[in-house]
Amino acid sequence: MRISGRHILDAFCRRHPDARRWIENWLEVVGSAIWSRPSDVKGIFATASFLAGGVVIFNVKGNSYRFETVILYRSGDVVVNWAGTHAAYDVRSRKRGRRS
């Protein structure tokens, strides 16, 4: 998969260095993956949450952090839109009226 939005993860890791190893592993796994459906993602990242519009939420480091992506299965793209603490994600979700 091609990953866009790496700068978001880089900035996140500067703020939360304890997550760097997890994020680097995620980048390696996703960069070499070929996903054609949500079950492909779930097979590797069992705690991933799937929302409308191809949005996938990944739990980082035992759910301490989360990041939001959009996966475009047909084109093979993963777009990172946001990364932060679980608490910040909860606030973000409430503002948008959704939960995962």
Image: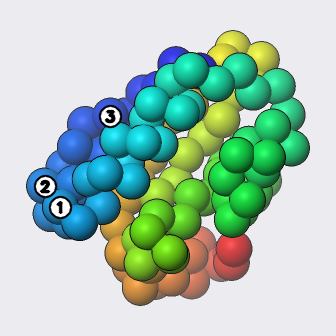
Does residue 58 appear to the left or right of 64 in the view shown?
right
Quick one: quadrant of the N terminus?
top right
Amino acid type at mark 3: Arg
Q: Is residue 21 above or below residue 62?
A: above
Quarter of the image where the C terminus is located: bottom right
Mark 2 or mark 3: which comes first in sequence? 3
Q: Is residue 89 visible?
A: no
Q: Residue at x 41, y 85 (%)?
A: 87
Q: Considering the numbered disc 2 on the image, is that residue within a helix, a strand or a loop? A: helix
For disc 1, the marked residue is: 17
Point out the residue furthest to the left here. 14
Alpha carbon of mark 3 to alpha carbon of mark 1: how far?
Answer: 15 Å
Q: Is residue 77 left or right of residue 80?
A: right
Query: Could you tell me how far apart the alpha carbons at marks 2 and 1 are, in whole angstroms?
Result: 6 Å
Looking at the image, tell me whether mark 3 or mark 1 is earlier in sequence order.
3
Left or right relative to 36: residue 14: left
Up the image or down, 12 lies above or below 7; here it is below
Judge by depth and name the residue closer to the eye, 80 or 97.
Answer: 80
- Which mark is drawn over residue 14? 2
Q: Pointers 2 and 3 in contact (CB under 8 A)?
A: no
Say which residue appears at 37% left-offset and 34% top-offset.
5
Element carrying mark 1: helix
Q: Amino acid at mark 1?
A: Pro
Cβ atoms at labels 3 and 1 below 8 Å apart:
no
Residue plotted at (57% across, 83% down): 94
Q: CA distance from mark 2 to mark 3?
A: 12 Å
